[in-house]
Image (tube, rainbow, N blue to C red):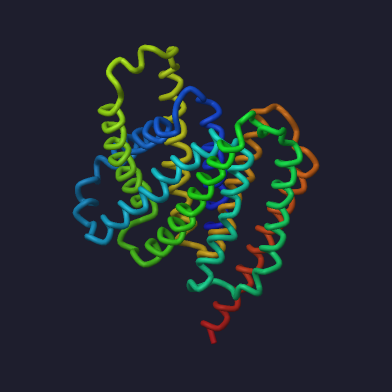
Amino acid sequence: MWRGIVSGLLAGAFWGAVFIVPVLLPDFSPAELMVGRYLCYGALAAGLMLPRLLPLLRRLRRGDWLALLRQALAGNVVYYLLLAYGVKLAGVAPTSLIIGLLPLSVTLFGRKDHGAPPLRRLALPLLVVAAGIACINVDIFSHAGGAGADGASLAHKLAGVLCAIGALACWTWYALDNARFLKRHAHVSAAEWAMLYGLASGVIALIVGAVMLALQPAGGADGGPARDWPRFWFVCLLLALGASVIGNYLWNLASRLVPVTLSGQLILSETLFALLYGFVYAQRMPRPLEWAAMLLLTAGVLWSVQRHAHEEGKGRGAGRT
């Protein structure tokens, strides 16, 4: 279980980087960022799997293909597209705040899975997490100007918030479906599933990219300023390697080793690292409420870990008797 906890926290460290990529590449649309990232992910996955790709594909069943398609769409393509639009329209902090509700949503929807403590035992840790999220919320709006912290109109901010809520729904569903699938299907390892997941995402991104090129007006790219495509592909490659290849492998490992409700708590590390990277990029220290939020979120996760460890210990004791 502790291997799973460490794997989940490290996955969050890699995933936190996705929140600042739309800020690093402001000249590119969220759809272009999504296509670039997952084309790179698919290419890396194909290269890493090449020697054993055909035997692995022959082992897959019809249900495995359907799971790959739905998880690649919900957990990668649609999720990242909505997250990137949320960051573009509402900013990094509000988007990370809403995605930070994942521990609550995954815990509430996955509480009936095997290995989950009763919800009443998680009530206090979740309350601490909610207090941390409330601190982030208060800080955001107390430092926002009339048109929004990033100068965006109210309509744009609202659209960004709705995109972030959509991303939250996608990833809640994906986290539960992925964890349940991996626990039921031991014929595919965590590393193999992460690579297959990347291949499926790459194929979908290739189709989306081809449609975007086909719909682009002839000569439409010539009228605007030149964009830094080498920087774009370099950032997409780094993101694909860190957040997708390594991060997804670590998350699949964690999903197989810890209860679903605890995996929901571990997702919170993504929010903490996103905030940390945002502070480094902005070259400033956290404000008092931001410090309070990070401390409360960390305390809530650690408390939840302790409750799950206690529940697992009771289960082992009952099994021995």
| Residue at 41 percent of width and 61 percent of height | 177
12 or 201, which is in the foreground? 201
Residue 266 lies left or right of residue 70; in this view the side is right
Asked which quadrant contains residue 35, the reply is: top left
| Residue at 24 percent of width and 46 percent of height | 52
Q: Position of residue 70 (x, y in %)?
A: 34, 54
Q: Is residue 141 above or below residue 153?
A: below
Q: Is residue 61 above or below residue 143?
A: below
Of all residues shown, which one is farthest toward the bottom? Answer: 321
Of all residues shown, which one is farthest toward the right? Answer: 288
114 or 154, which is in the foreground? 154
Q: Position of residue 121 (x, y in %)?
A: 66, 73
Residue 140 lies left or right of residue 246; in this view the side is right
159 or 58, which is in the foreground? 159
Asked which quadrant contains residue 213, the reply is: top left
Tell me the quadrant of the picture where the C terminus can be found: bottom right
Q: Position of residue 90 (x, y in %)?
A: 58, 37
How many marks do you count on the picture?
0
| Residue at 22 percent of width and 57 percent of height | 59
37 or 217, which is in the foreground? 217
Residue 34 lies left or right of residue 7; in this view the side is left
Q: Position of residue 145 (x, y in %)?
A: 72, 33
Tell me the quadrant of the picture where the N terminus can be found: bottom right
